[in-house]
Image (cartoon, rainbow, N blue to C red):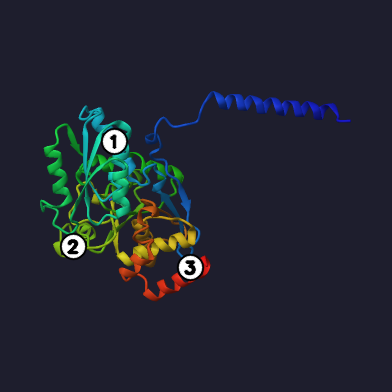
Amino acid sequence: MIPHFVEFNYLCDKFLNLFSLFKKNKSVQASESILDLVGNTPLVKLQKVTANYSGTFYAKLEWFNPGQSSKDRIALSIIENAEAKGLIKPGSTIVETTSGNTGFSLAMASMVKGYKCILAVSSKSSQDKIDGLKAMGAEVHICPAHVAADDPRSYYEVAKRIHAETPNSIYINQYFNELNTEAHYKTTGPEIWKQTAGKITHLVACSGTGGTISGTARYLKEQNPSIQILGVDAYGSVIKKYHETGKFDENEIHPYRIEGLGKNLIPSATDFSVIDTFVKVTDKDAALAARNLAQTEGIFAGYTSGAALRATELYNDQNIFDENSVVVIILPDHGSRYLSKIYSEKWMTEQGFIEAEDLVETLEKSAITNS
Ligand code: PMP
């Protein structure tokens, strides 16, 4: 015989379950559109890659944005700013220069909001990225990567020409648009400050347009001026030298493989005054660091994320961190955009980043596993 109080508890539980089910059905938990999911990306503590460094290290995973990169933030923010100013309305055209990620975010926002999207893309961009832009409905113009920025064939000049020739269009101009930097000032900075409960001591971030690093830095330094902003640049780019000397040195420029990092011009979107220092990384080291991140932490990140991790290692070698350091490393996009590059053993071997013997060994291993 079951005691009465047990029966009573059972009935109470049943009633509460039914009540909560009823409540859940009353409000569907969904976003109005994919664009509502932009921002509020997670921070994850690194357990292994930084285990031998001084301090605690966190990665901010920007591919949790719905367009899978940090560029969703600027695409949405700049488009909504243009809408608010009455510069565009459904049917207008969005034109941009892009290594891929900004284009994808703009194409995504254009699709939802009813704009046409035309993109001038560098020939250096991976085929995966170019295919993604087309799949998202964008018109893509591929321009040679290794020409001067003012060459009429460069992706800057091509985008400018398309904008001039297309009525009812806006040119996003991310390299020279202060709204790019402002988007990170308004979102990425406050998120990191909140997520670290104000404990962040160092930020490691790549610099392309410079919007991410300087917008985030500006916010963080306003909260605590002693936070150190550690930039990441590529060999072949002019950014680090310009930061140190104030001079644009053409001799620094040479072709390199990393997409989205560094530049052959000085973007006005970069606020150099809030960045403390830069290191440069090589194509090989950045690629190996990204592959290592996947194989140690299970974090499958893009090429510039590898650059940011390699830079963190170089900063650690310079004894910049101590045991009280709380370091946030921004990882801009996901590894799936680089399957035909840094995550292709064939490509890695062709570049000389891994030895042919390593590849033969891996192929033999996988042949045994698959047989
Ligand atoms: N990483 C990737 C993959 C990018 O596409 C970009 C943008 N060019 C960056 C880093 C650099 O970000 P930002 O332009 O905000 O400096």
Which residue does the numbered mark 1 point to in the structure image? Answer: 110
Give the farthest residue toward the right: 1
Picture layout, residue 263 above or below residue 187:
below
Name the element at disc 2.
loop
Disc nearer the start of the sequence (3/2) = 2
In this rendering, which labeled residue sits more in front, label 2 or label 1?
1
Can residue 320 be seen here? The reply is: no
Along the line of sight, the residue nearer the viewer: 364 or 216? 364
Q: Is mark 3 within 8 Å of ligand 1?
A: no
Measured in 3D between alpha carbons, the distance from the residue under mark 1 to the one under mark 3, in whole angstroms, is 43 Å
Give residue 366's mark.
3
In this rendering, which labeled residue sits more in front, label 3 or label 2?
3
Q: Amino acid at mark 3?
A: Ser
Which residue does the numbered mark 2 point to in the structure image? Answer: 253
Give the farthest residue toward the bottom: 357
Which of the 4 image quadrants contains residue 115? top left
Q: Is residue 26 left or right of residue 185?
A: right
Measured in 3D between alpha carbons, the distance from the residue under mark 2 to the one under mark 1, in whole angstroms, is 34 Å
Q: Amino acid at mark 2?
A: Ile
Q: Position of residue 301 (x, y in %)?
A: 40, 55
